[in-house]
Amino acid sequence: MEDEETTLDIRDFFNVLKKRRKLIVLVVLICTLASAVLSFFVIQPTYEADTTIIIGKLAENGKSNTQYNDVMMYQNLIKTYAQIAGSNVVMEGASSKLNGAFSPEKLKKVVSITPQQGTQILQIKGQSKDPAEAVKMVNAVSSSFIAESKKVFPTGGNINIMDSPRFPDKPVKPKKLLNVAIAFFIGLLVSVGFSFMLEYMDNTIKTEDDIKKQIGIPVLGIIPKEQS
């Protein structure tokens, strides 16, 4: 008996999908096309440039001092340097280097400072609609950071740029194909859910099976529809 009920439930599931197939297809198409239009033609691409800065200590002969205690000290201090890099004074200096093209507040929103855990490396990323501007922002922030960190933390180690920012040739946002795929699945889920909601709210009796389910009485006979 349980197998029969399960079979009927699965059959009802597919019947609902078949019954509402036009609605499902329409919603999926609208969501997918809307996402494609926005991703390919409306949303402006965003480019990202980044630079990595290494913080360490130089010995008197100019060579790197690789003592374990020094390495651990600078790994622990990397968060302090990250706070310095994201400070108002650094952003103000970077804004000045950019001739005021970006305010310090704007730079704080589009530039991210990330310490690489377990290393002496600090990564600075900048995003802009213009790839050249992204490179300029990162260069300005990194330059201001190096200058200001020597003022506020003169006993710290040497700060050197390890990787200079490269001109980004591909945008990082929007991820066009991913957006379209997400919109497709969202449209599918919404349309299927809406179809079952409509089916659940529909209390009209259309077949003998509906009489059995909703009224609970057996069907003794069916009056055929007269064909004209």
Image (spheres, grey):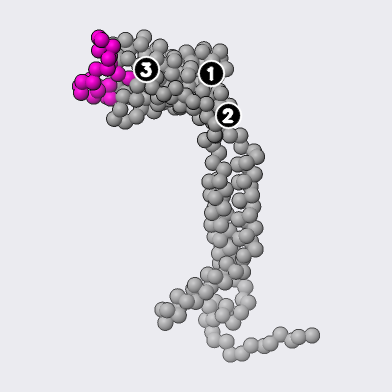
Question: Is 54 on the left or on the right of 199, as rendered?
Answer: left
Q: Secondary structure at mark 1?
A: loop
Q: Is residue 219 visible to the viewer in this orientation of the structure? A: yes
Check disc 1 and report the residue beneath it.
Answer: 103
Q: Are marks 2 and 3 in contact (CB under 8 Å)?
A: no
Task: State the image quarter where residue 46 is shown.
Answer: top right
Question: Is 52 on the left or on the right of 194, as rendered?
Answer: left
Task: State the image quarter where residue 114 is shown.
Answer: top left
- From mark 2 to mark 3, how far is it between C-alphas? 28 Å
Check disc 3 and report the residue beneath it.
Answer: 160
- Residue type at mark 2: give it: Lys
Q: Position of residue 135 (x, y in %)?
A: 51, 23
Question: Closer to the N terminus: mark 2 or mark 3?
Answer: 2
Q: Position of residue 15 (x, y in %)?
A: 57, 72
- For discs 1 and 3, the disc positioned in front in the rendered view: 3
Q: Residue at x 52, y 29 (%)?
A: 168
- From mark 2 to mark 1, how far is it between C-alphas? 16 Å
- Residue type at mark 3: give it: Asn
32 or 218, which lies in front?
Answer: 32
Dot 2 surroundings within 10 Å: few (below 14), some, or many (20 or more)? some
Q: Residue at x 62, y 60 (%)?
A: 25
Question: Closer to the N terminus: mark 1 or mark 3?
Answer: 1
224 or 33, which lies in front?
Answer: 33
Give the mark count: 3
Question: Closer to the N terminus: mark 2 or mark 1?
Answer: 1
- For discs 2 and 1, the disc positioned in front in the rendered view: 2
- From mark 1 to mark 3, how far is it between C-alphas? 25 Å
Q: Are marks 1 and 3 in contact (CB under 8 Å)?
A: no
Which region is colored magenta? 55-76
Q: Is residue 68 magenta?
A: yes
Q: Residue at x 51, y 13 (%)?
A: 97
